[in-house]
Image (cartoon, rainbow, N blue to C red):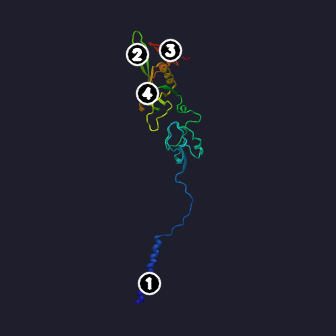
């Protein structure tokens, strides 16, 4: 009897051991061998693009503000500067000046740089426009609150002589409207923190050829020229009723009409 129990017990132990071995092999399969396939390419194809590493104000050099940055190749614009196309761009463009304000992380475009051999003012002046300077003071420039890139009206005040027993006085009229201010003295923008800077003595205005002639005549005729600051919301409005009569008469450009003691005379007509 004891021998049969021992046999049964031995069979049970052997069966339990076999079941444990099978369960262990099923729960933890042998790991597959790792094969080194080398470095993998990124899921998105990248291209190095020249970008601004920090903010650059208008007129400042971009030297020290540029760096290469990986960009998705599908998002690279044709106007961007890439390392694959121009590997020496960092060195070639380091002395360029910013035509407009640029900001950190922005891809660099050549259209925003002053070209080699160009002066800064002529490079920011739109085609067909003229830059004309006029003297200003705090009392003729909105108390000094007019800054570059603001828009102004130009108001002429002149004295009238007494005629026919009348009294002398002053005549005031707006001779130019919605004119962009390019610079105040040598400053072409506000300071970096946006503070209002000191009042300058000269404002440089962006004018058409006709407007340049008007303000040149007005500077000779006027007792005072005043700049009236306009709202930024008016920047796209078209000018109306400008003083074209100062430089044109009977359809002839270049004619100057002199007004004295109520009499109008035309001189200097171009043939």
**Badge 2 element:** strand
Residue indicated by mark 3: 266
Residue indicated by mark 2: 169
| Residue at 49% across, 25% down | 134
- Which is nearer the eye, 136 or 72? 136
**Badge 3 element:** strand
**Going by the picture, which residue comes out furthest to the front?**
198
Q: Considering only vertical position in the picture, is 58 above or below 222?
A: below
Determine the CA span between mark 1 and mark 2: 133 Å
**Of label 1 and label 4, which has the lower sequence position?**
1
* Mark 1 in CB contact with mark 2 (< 8 angstroms): no
Residue indicated by mark 4: 138
Residue indicated by mark 1: 10
Determine the CA span between mark 2 and mark 4: 24 Å
**Of label 1 and label 3, which has the lower sequence position?**
1
Give coordinates of residue 81: x percent, y percent: 56, 43
**Badge 1 element:** helix
Determine the CA span between mark 4 and mark 3: 34 Å
| Residue at 59% across, 41% down | 92
- Which is nearer the eye, 238 or 259? 259
**Going by the picture, which residue comes out furthest to the bottom?**
1
* Mark 1 in CB contact with mark 3 (< 8 angstroms): no
């Amino acid at each position: 009897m004891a021998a049969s129990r021992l046999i049964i017990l031995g069979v049970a132990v052997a069966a339990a051991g076999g079941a444990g071995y099978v369960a262990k092999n099923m729960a933890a399969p042998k790991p597959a061998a790792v094969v080194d396939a080398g470095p993998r390419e990124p899921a998105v194809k990248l291209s190095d693009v020249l970008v601004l590493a920090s903010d650059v104000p208008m007129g400042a050099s971009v030297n020290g503000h540029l760096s290469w940055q990986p960009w998705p190749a599908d998002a690279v614009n044709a106007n961007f500067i890439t390392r694959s196309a121009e590997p020496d761009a960092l060195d070639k463009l380091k002395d360029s000046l910013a035509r407009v304000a640029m900001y950190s992380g922005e891809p660099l475009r050549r259209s925003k740089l002053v070209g080699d051999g160009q002066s800064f003012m002529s490079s920011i002046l739109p085609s067909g426009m003229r830059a004309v300077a006029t003297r200003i003071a705090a009392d003729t420039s909105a108390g000094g609150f007019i800054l570059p890139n603001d828009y102004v009206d130009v108001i002429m005040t002149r004295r009238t002589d007494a005629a026919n027993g009348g009294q002398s006085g002053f005549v005031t009229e707006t001779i130019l409207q919605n004119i962009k201010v390019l610079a105040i003295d040598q400053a072409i923008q506000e300071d970096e923190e946006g503070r209002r800077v000191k009042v300058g003595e000269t404002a440089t205005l962006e004018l058409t050829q006709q407007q340049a002639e008007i303000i040149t005549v007005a500077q000779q005729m006027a007792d005072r020229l005043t700049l009236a600051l306009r709202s930024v919301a008016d920047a796209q409005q078209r000018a109306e009723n400008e003083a074209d009569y100062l430089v044109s008469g009977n359809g002839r450009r270049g004619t100057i009409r002199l007004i004295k003691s109520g009499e109008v005379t035309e001189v200097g007509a171009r043939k």
